[in-house]
Amino acid sequence: MTNTPLPRSLDPVPGELLPGYLLRLAHRIALPPLDLGHLCGLTTGPIFPARHLVRLDAAQAQQIADICRLHPAEVHALTLAGQAPGYTPLRIDYLGRHQSSVTMANDGWVLTAFSRYCPDCLTDTAQLPGGSVWQGAWRLPHTFLCERHNRLLAWQCPACHAPAFSNGYRSDGRWRPTQLIPAPGQRLHPARCRHRAGSGRASACGQPLDQPTGEHLRPTPAMTHAHRRLAEAATAGADHEVASLGQRVSAQSFFNDVRATVSAVRGSWPMASEVFAELGSMDAVTAHVDALRRPHPERTAALGDGRVARTFGHPPADPLPAAALMALTVAILDDPNGHHTLAPLLSALPSTSTAHIRLRRHASHCSPTMTAVLRGVVRLPRKAVGKPALFPQPATHRGRLDPHTIPAVLPEHWTTPLDELDVPRRQLRRDAAIRLVQMATGRSRRSAALYLGIPLGSLHSATVTIRPWQKEPGNAVAYQNALHRVAEIAIADGEGDPRGASAR
């Protein structure tokens, strides 16, 4: 592979994404997009990987720059990471887990399986070299309208009624793997439908998409407001703060709040529709939720709605329910008292539901207010963060505290310092007794429990409760301070044994 520049190239248009740029350039130089991808080093076979949508490494960007006569910075600006730096799902460390570009390309919260589009925008740019421009923002799940033309985006081809910029379905109704450009081996004008029906070797539909019919849905004021809020956060810098539930938070926390709210609204539907009926288009959300709740075989059956399988847990593919759902979501987050609206929705989620499980995974990455309402209503497991817990307990009172004076069930007046801690009382007092023996003798945790006559099952119960709680910020220090106060009370009780005959 040589980096010989093409005889002719194109300047990228602001907001253009890599697939659209390659489509225009391939059309201008009369090459199939896949062949251009080979020249640019983006693929070596018949598959055009969608991971290049997300970000490019330095070598890939340089290769494209050399071939297309661009600067590497211009190439990086053709990726979603370059166009939406504040959009949380595009972060490599999203929700505390490392994401590869492949993982992101298949996550419906990162990008849609196809591109929505505005027919009017395709018409307006039809005279540019290479043809019509596909905007990068159209690929983001929260971009559902065109403010310039005051219309909801389209997504289906007017001829074949399938997603116009998609790689199509398999015979069983499921999506084919997403590619950077659908039907990459076929030469088509950028504004033509590239959906392929039937087998993967079928010809693309080819229907012109830049011919507005005049029949389109206009967004409500609430939809337009939500779209602006989401777009502002997605393009925000690292220091930019966004309002959410009455607080100024980072764009990262805001989008995590958005995702949590979408899960709560959709999982408890139609409860939210009764509160926000004035926002309009609630019937579109109802149809979307009803489709998601169909049995799995019906959602993935051949000739069925394969889009539903792809969008389960993600924003809807259809821009109308997506707009209605996001308008409702932003309305909740705009309200400083929105947590009062969220609480009953969250309480309605079954603990085994997909929404509940999803919330457990990313609750700690939300804003403080959202995390608090999730922890209080959904009863999320305590996440281990902060400094390591003190296991085993150090022998800080050896020679001062007599282990023979420590009972398995601590006297009430000993445990007063423990009452200030937010943890189940029974397990805490049992754990405190074990730790007091360790503080006095330096024994292992198991040995201290056996010394007190505490069954190993009870030891395990206390451990699984106290260990994660102690790992939360501030709890380990607070617990140690309380234990030291308990030890001082025990020492002050003198040499008498307070355990009595019933202690063991």
Image: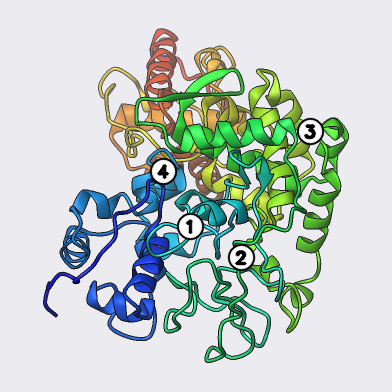
- SS label for mark 4: loop
| Disc number placed over residue 344 in the picture, else none | 3
Q: Position of residue 354 (x, y in %)?
A: 67, 56
Name the front one of labels 1 and 2.
2
Reply above or below: 303 against 373.
below
- SS label for mark 1: loop
How far apart marks 2 and 3 lie (CA) works out to: 44 Å
How far apart marks 4 and 3 lie (CA) works out to: 33 Å
Name the front one of labels 2 and 4.
2
Number of numbered tags placed on the structure image: 4
Q: Position of residue 347 (x, y in %)?
A: 76, 38
What's the amino acid at mark 1? Trp
Q: Position of residue 409 (x, y in %)?
A: 56, 28
Reply above or below: 237 against 175.
above
Which of the two labelled residues, at mark 3 and mark 1, occupies the earlier sequence position? 1
Name the front one of labels 4 and 3.
4
| Disc number placed over residue 263 in the picture, else none | none
| Disc number placed over residue 209 in the picture, else none | 2
Name the front one of labels 4 and 1.
1
What's the amino acid at mark 2? Leu
Reading the image, the residue beneath label 4 is 84
Q: Quadrant of residue 67?
A: bottom left
| Residue closest to the eye, 500 or 40 | 40
What's the amino acid at mark 3? Pro
Residue shown at 11%/77% (left/top)?
2
* Image quarter hosting the C terminus: top right
